Image (tube, rainbow, N blue to C red):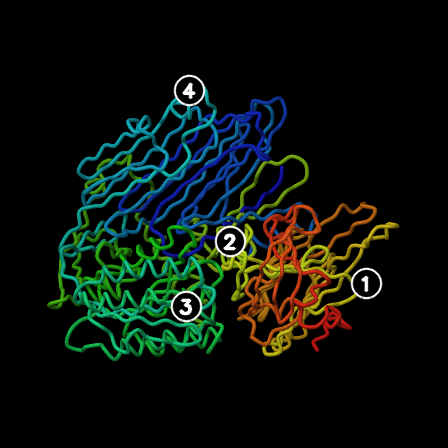
Amino acid sequence: MSAVMLCLCVCVCMAITAMAQGTVGIRDHDKSKQIELQSMKVDCKVASRFAHTTMTTKAFNVANDSKEVFFDVDLPKTAFITNFTIEIEGQVYISEVKEKEKARQQYEKAVSSGQSAGLVKAFGRHMEKFSVSVNVAAQSLVTFTLTYEELLRRRLGSYEIMIGVRPKQLVQNFEIVVDIDEPQGIKFVDVNSTFITNELLPLVEKVVTVKKAHVYFSPTLDQQRQCPDCEGTLIDGDFLIKYDVNHAQDIGEIQIVNGYFVHFFAPENLPQIPKNVVFVIDRSGSMDGEKMKQTREALLTILSDLHKDDYFGLVTFDDVIESWRPLLSKATPENVTAAKKFVKTITARHFTDINKAVLHAVDMLTAEQSESLPDTSMIILLTDGRPSAGEQDLSIIQKNVHDAINGSLSLFCLGFGNDLDYSLLDTMAKQNDGLARRIYEGSDATLQLQGFYEEVASPLLLEVNLSYPGDTVTSLTDSHFKHFFEGSEIVVAGRLKESEIDNFMTEVSAIGLEEQFVVKGLVINEERDSVFPDQEYIFGDFMEHLWAYLTIQQLLDKRDKCSPDEKDNITAQALDLSLRYHFVTPLTSMVVTKPQTGDEETLIADKLTEDEREDRTESDLSVMGVRAPPRSMSSRRKLKHSFLNSADGDPHFIIELPDQNDALCFNFDDKPGTIFNLVRDPLTGIVVNGQIIGEKKEVPGVKMHTYFGSFGIVHEQLGVKLMVSTKEISVSEEGKHAKLLWSITRTVKGRSINLKVMKDQSLTVTLRDSVKFLIILHKVWKNHPYHQDYLGFYTLDSHLLSKSVHGLLGQFYHGVNFEVSGLIPGTDPGKQDAIMFVKGNKLTVTRGLKKDFRQNVKNGENVPCWFIHNNGDGLLDGLHTDYIMSDLFKTI
C-alpha cells in the first residue's frame, strides 16, 4: 500500500461549460480485453445553475493475474473537485484537501526518501485532465468515484453542460443522467451529441416540465457496438445539453436556502447601447500564415455584424503603430466596406510593441467619448506574442495601460496560440474591467474570434449596481458590474445575517440607453420546500456551496489587481474557504491514499493555471514546419520567427521555417571537449555555450560520433549562470546557488530565472521577460560499451532576442535569405541535390532528414531539410571553428 498524492491545481479563466469526460482502460494498450468495464455513470444535478457532477466507473479484472487499471476524467477548467474515492476489494480510500504547499512538501519528502514519483499534467481548450491508476488483483473489482462542482455561466442566451464520454470499449451498464431544477422556470432544453447516430437518437430521453428537466441516455451493450459483430464502441465524443430559463424583467430572481441567497439578473428586451470599439491587431512576424489569414476572416465577419449606431476604429501594430483612420468611424455600410478593404491588406511584418499599440487605441477612444450620451467604449486586443519592441517591462506596460484608461473604458484581450505572455493579457484585462481569452490555433480559430465578439457585441446596461440592506445581508460577492451584455447574466451571492429574516428590500440601478435604469423589489424568504419541492433534485447545502464557489473565484481574480499586502489577505481568505468546503483550487491540492503493489509511488496530477499551461505547451508544441519538399523548383525564403532552432544529436543543427514550409540543417565535426558558442546577444547579455563529448571509447576503423554533453547559459544583466550536464543541473542567481537532479520532477522559480525539470526527460529554462530554452536529456543504457548520455538544445521563442544576436544558432534567429533551384539526383541514392544561393555563396545541398526530439525523446520526429555540407561552410558566418570558446561561461 502506498500514499499517492494527487495535487490538483485548478486554473481560473473564463469558461461556461460543465464537462465530465471519463476513460478507463489498461495501460500499454493491452489488446486482451482482460479489464471489463462493468459500468460507467455520469450523474449531473443542476440546481439554480450550480452543477454537481459525479463520475463513477466500475472495472473488473477477469484475468488470472493483476492488471493496471487507469481512470481518466477531463474536467472543466472552472470546476472545483470536491471528492475522489477508490474502492477495491471492499476497502474505500478517501481523499483529503490540503494547502498546496503542505501537500507539495509531502510529495518532496516522498521523493527524497527514495519513493518513485511521477507528474501527470494535461490540458485542452475547456478541460484539465485528472488521471490515476491502480493495480487490481485477479478476479477483483475496482470502483472510481470523482465529484466536482461549478457554476454554469450564461453565454449567448444559454447555459451549456458538455459531458465528454470516451470509454474506448463496450460498457455493460452505461448511463448519463442529468437533472435540472430551475425555480424561475425552464424556457427550453436542447440535447445534442457528436457521436449519436440515427439508431441511438431514440434512446435519448428528455422530459421537460415547468421548472424541471430530466435527460437520460443508456444504450445497451449491443446498441453501443459500431456494427453487430464489432467490439468497437460508438460512444466516443461529447454529449451536449443547452438550456435557458425564464428571466424576470424587474429585479431578477432571488433565491434563499438555509440562510444563503443568490441573485440572478438578466433582463431582456432592453435597447442596445451604442459602443465605441477599437480593434487592435498584432501584425508581427509570428502572425504570418494561417493566424493572419484567420484573423482577417474573423474581422471581415465582425465588421459586418457591427450595430448601425456603433463607432469603430482599426489599429495594426508590430514595432510600428498604424491606424486605418485617425478617428473613429460610424458603422455605415460605406465605412464598413472601406474598413474591409483595409483588413484584406494587413500582413505580418516585424516585432511586437503592445504598450504603444494599446495606448494609441486609448487615445482614439478618449477623444471620442461623450458626456451627454451613454456609450460603451472598449478595446479588443488580439496578439500572439510577447512584447519585443518598445516598452518590454511587463509591470510598466500594465501601469501605463491602467493609468491611461483610468476606468473610462474596458480592455478585452485575446491571446492567439501558446507562444505568448497570457498572464500579461489576463492582468491587463482584469485591471481594466475586461477579460482575457485564449484563442486556440486550429481550423476553427476564426469561429472562436467571432464567438468572443458576439459575447460583447450588444451592451444593454452600464455601471450596474445591485444593492442590499447592510443590516440584513453580509459576505456579499461582487455587486457592481461595468456592463451587462445581451445573452449574459449577472450573479451575486451572499449570506443573511439572521436566517430567520422574513424579507428585505433590494434595488438594481444602472445606466440604460434612454434613461436611468432603476428597479426595486421586496425579497421574501420562502421555505426551502416551496422553492425546491422535489428534494431528489437537490444535493446538500448547494446554495452555500454556490456562494463559496463564487466567492473563491472572485477572490482569486482580485489577487491580480491589488497591492502585495491586500494580496496576502485575499489569498488567506480564498485558502480558508477552499479548505473549509473541500474545494481543489489553485491554493489547494488533493491527497489520496491509493493501493499499490511493490515500491511506493507518489503522483501529482495538476490542473494547470494559464501560466503553467503556457510553460508546458512551450515544450509540448507540435513541430510546425516542413513536412514535404518545396512545391516549386525555385523559391526564395525569409526566416522570420522560427519555431525550431536546435542543436541535437551528432551534433546536428536544424533551422526550421514553419510558415515557409522549409528548413536548413548542418553538422560539424570536432574533438570531444571542444566548447562552441551557440547564442550570444550583446544587447540582452544572454550567452549559451555547449561542450561536445564523444563515445566512451573509440571503435577501430569507425568514425567517432560527437554530441553535446553540457551547456552553460549566462544572462549578464540578470546575474544568472546555469550549467546543465547529463548528471545534474546547477544554477547561480545573484550569489545564490542551487542544484537539481534529472531524476526528480521539480519546478524552481527565482527572481530572474525559472527552471522546470521533467524527470529524466527535459529542462525548460525561462529567463525573466525574455527567451525560453528547452534542453532534452537523451538517456542511454548505462552498460552500453560505447554510447553515453547526451543533451539536445532547443530555442522556443528566438524572436525575443535582439537583432544583434549571433552564434552558431543565434545568427539565424532573425532571418536568412536563400534560393534553391535545379533539383538533380544526388550522390546518395534516394536523396536529391540542388543548388542553393545563400549569403553570396553557391552551394550544393542535399535534401535529407534530421530528428526533432521535443515530442518523442526516444525516437524523435523526422524534419525534412536542406543539408549544407562541409561543416556548414557558406551558410555560417565564417567557419565553425570561429565559434570555439575557451570556457563554458565565456561571454566574449
Q: Residue at x 61, y 45 (%)?
A: 602
Residue under label 4, please give it. 228
- Secondary structure beneath dot 2 equals loop
- Secondary structure beneath dot 3 equals loop
Quadrant hosting residue 488: bottom left
Residue 671's disc number: 1
Residue under label 2, please give it. 631
Residue 283's disc number: 3
Of badges 2 and 4, the one in the foreground is: 2
Judging depth in this view, the residue of 779 and 98 nearest the camera is 779
- Secondary structure beneath dot 4 equals loop
The amino acid sitting under disc 1 is Lys
- Around disc 4, counting alpha carbons within 10 Å, would you say few (fewer than 14), some (14 to 19), or many (20 or more)? few
- Around disc 3, counting alpha carbons within 10 Å, would you say few (fewer than 14), some (14 to 19), or many (20 or more)? many
The amino acid sitting under disc 4 is Pro
Of badges 2 and 3, the one in the foreground is: 2
- Residue 193 visible? The answer is yes
